[in-house]
Amino acid sequence: QKEVEQNSGPLSVPEGAIASLNCTYSDRGSQSFFWYRQYSGKSPELIMFIYSNGDKEDGRFTAQLNKASQYVSLLIRDSQPSDSATYLCAVIGTGNQFYFGTGTSLTVIP
Amino acid sequence: DTGVSQDPRHKITKRGQNVTFRCDPISEHNRLYWYRQTLGQGPEFLTYFQNEAQLEKSRLLSDRFSAERPKGSFSTLEIQRTEQGDSAMYLCASSLGPSSYNEQFFGPGTRLTVL
């Protein structure tokens, strides 16, 4: 079992819609959770981090964490074509290692 | 630009040659990480440093790979006797550390092609 699992997609949404990206993790002791955006050929760029159960909002982005279900999600409201990228979920495990998922490819259709 | 720099940005080498990559982290960041990423995969952890100390190394990492951070500032990653399977993007990231809450910032990466 991989430490972090994501649906690889591709996920397509029309411009202006809400994109929902999901991630599960295996290490129940994990404390820190991150979402990175990666454009093709570029390095990952931090979008959001969340440490506590519940929702955290930043502009058009909302991260949701449910530690009991070992589940993290990212919602992108009013999706724009510039949001088209691969979204990586990352988790810091109990050993202080960063584990990344394989990423979900998102395409926002104009 | 996150403030993390890597050099070179691209490297083409022949199988069996040695290569060395450099990473300069954000100046006040104590932790420095190396990752490898292949197409369609997320970054795979290789190793990380807290200042000059190498605290952890992936069990999957071959003995041909070695990393240093001699003065706790920049770091180098060396791959000896390169193989075609080493072709990948090598990413460096830094964080304030040592808290587990510190987010990582990535450099632009070094793309290695082994012929």
Image (tube, coloured by chain):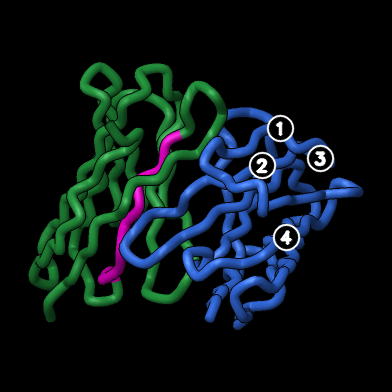
- Label 2 or label 3, whichever lies nearer to me, is 2
Tag 4's secondary structure?
strand
- What's under tag 1, amino acid-wise? Leu
The residue beneath circle 1 is B55
- Label 4 or label 2, whichever lies nearer to me, is 4
- The answer to whether mark 4 and mark 3 are in CB contact below 8 A is no
Distance of label 4 from label 1 (alpha carbons)? 17 Å
Distance of label 4 from label 2 (alpha carbons)? 14 Å
Which label's residue is closer to the chain start, 4 or 2? 2
Q: Which chain is blue?
A: B
- Crowdedness near tag 2: few (<14), some (14–19) or many (≥20) residues, C-alpha within 10 Å: many
Question: Are labels 2 and 3 assigned to the same chain?
Answer: yes
- Crowdedness near tag 1: few (<14), some (14–19) or many (≥20) residues, C-alpha within 10 Å: few
Q: Chain A in the picture: what colour?
A: green
Magenta region, residue range: A83-91
Q: Is residue B52 left or right of residue B47?
A: right
Placement of A13 over or under B101, stated as above or below: below
- The answer to whether mark 4 and mark 2 are in CB contact below 8 A is no
Q: Is residue A79 left or right of residue B60?
A: left
Placement of A106 over or under A103, stated as above or below: below
Q: Is residue B2 left or right of residue A27?
A: right
The residue beneath circle 3 is B51
Tag 2's secondary structure?
strand
The residue beneath circle 2 is B48
- What's under tag 2, amino acid-wise? Tyr
Tag 3's secondary structure?
loop
- What's under tag 3, amino acid-wise? Asn
